[in-house]
């Protein structure tokens, strides 16, 4: 039996996307194992879930560190877990070369908008205020720029006339919970390459 690909999940808060990844593993939709959960905040609610699941957890606080110093500290903590893929799941710090160069094309993020529209904080409210009729979520590879790397998968949700920023965010979050595990499964188990900014998956027939 071959061993399962190893995920290290980075969180800063609630951890509902972490829970969605774990649910997908349990339900056989995602063939992977969670090697560790790492937070930059000791009070991240997602850490409680991780501990309850028996996953190794670590806290690498960003307080008092530059972006580069924090990324270097994260690298030292994450490397021993030998991740095949690092999943940012509500991780609210920008990563820098000490981390990104150590794991090229092996870091993914989920963002609650259809990138390149509405990067950054409060993306759901940005979309609501702009008046777009559809929004959604984006899973993308992580580079050194904010919400910028090549796109792996996107899901579209409608913006309804009676939406509030909160109801829109809830609809997007439900899409995130389906999209992130599906994207991670595809990255781990289907051959792919990068052409320019495009992540191109090879169909099994042409492998
Ligand atoms: C999600 O909306 C995700 O797209 C964004 O931060 C939020 C994290 O939520 N990057 P959770 O911690 O996974 O519940």
Image (spheres, rainbow, N blue to C red):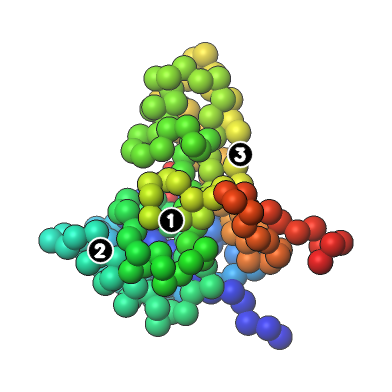
Q: In which quarter of the image is residue 81?
A: bottom left
Secondary structure of the residue carrying numbered label 1: loop
Residue 59 appears in the figure: no
Residue pushed farthest right? 205
Residue linked to disc 1: 143
Q: What x and y, as percent, mark residue 146?
A: 38, 47
Relative side of 6 to 68, left or right? right
Circle 1 residues within 10 Å: few <14, some 14–19, many ≥20: many
Residue drawn 34% across the image and 38% down it = 121
The answer for how far apart the CA atoms under marks 3 and 1 are is 21 Å
| Mark 2 beta carbon near ligand 1 (under 8 Å) | no
| Mark 1 beta carbon near ligand 1 (under 8 Å) | no
Name the mark on residue 5. Answer: none
In which quadrant is the C terminus drawn? bottom right
Residue drawn 43% across the image and 45% down it = 147
Circle 3 residues within 10 Å: few <14, some 14–19, many ≥20: some
Q: What x and y, as percent, mark residue 54?
A: 43, 74
The answer for how far apart the CA atoms under marks 2 and 1 are is 14 Å
Q: What x and y, as percent, mark residue 48?
A: 34, 62
Secondary structure of the residue carrying numbered label 2: helix
First in sequence: mark 3 vs mark 1: 1
Relative side of 175 to 18, left or right? right
Marker count (numbered):
3
First in sequence: mark 3 vs mark 2: 2
From what the image shows, is residue 39 above or below residue 93? below
From what the image shows, is residue 107 above or below residue 171? below
Residue drawn 45% across the image and 69% down it = 103
Residue linked to disc 2: 68
Residue drawn 59% across the image and 59% down it = 184
First in sequence: mark 2 vs mark 1: 2
Residue linked to disc 3: 155
Q: Quadrant of residue 164?
A: top left
């Amino acid at each position: 039996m071959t061993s399962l690909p190893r995920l290290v999940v980075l969180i800063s808060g609630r951890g509902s996307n972490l829970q969605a990844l774990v649910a997908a593993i349990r339900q056989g939709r995602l063939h992977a194992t969670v090697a560790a959960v790492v937070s930059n905040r000791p009070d991240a609610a997602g850490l409680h879930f991780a501990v309850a699941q028996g996953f190794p957890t670590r806290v690498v606080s960003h307080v008092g560190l530059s972006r580069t110093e924090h990324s270097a500290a994260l690298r030292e903590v994450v490397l021993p877990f030998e991740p095949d893929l690092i999943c940012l799941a509500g991780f609210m710090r920008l990563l820098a070369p000490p981390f990104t160069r150590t794991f090229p094309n092996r870091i993914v993020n989920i963002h609650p908008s259809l990138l390149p529209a509405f990067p950054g904080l409060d993306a759901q409210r940005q979309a609501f205020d702009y008046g777009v009729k559809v929004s959604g979520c984006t899973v993308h590879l992580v580079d050194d720029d904010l919400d910028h790397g090549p796109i792996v998968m996107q899901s579209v949700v409608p913006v309804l006339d009676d939406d509030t920023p909160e109801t829109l965010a809830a609809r997007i979050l439900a899409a995130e919970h389906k999209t992130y595990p599906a994207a991670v499964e595809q990255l781990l188990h289907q051959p792919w390459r990068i052409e320019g900014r495009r992540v191109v998956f090879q169909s099994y027939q042409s492998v």
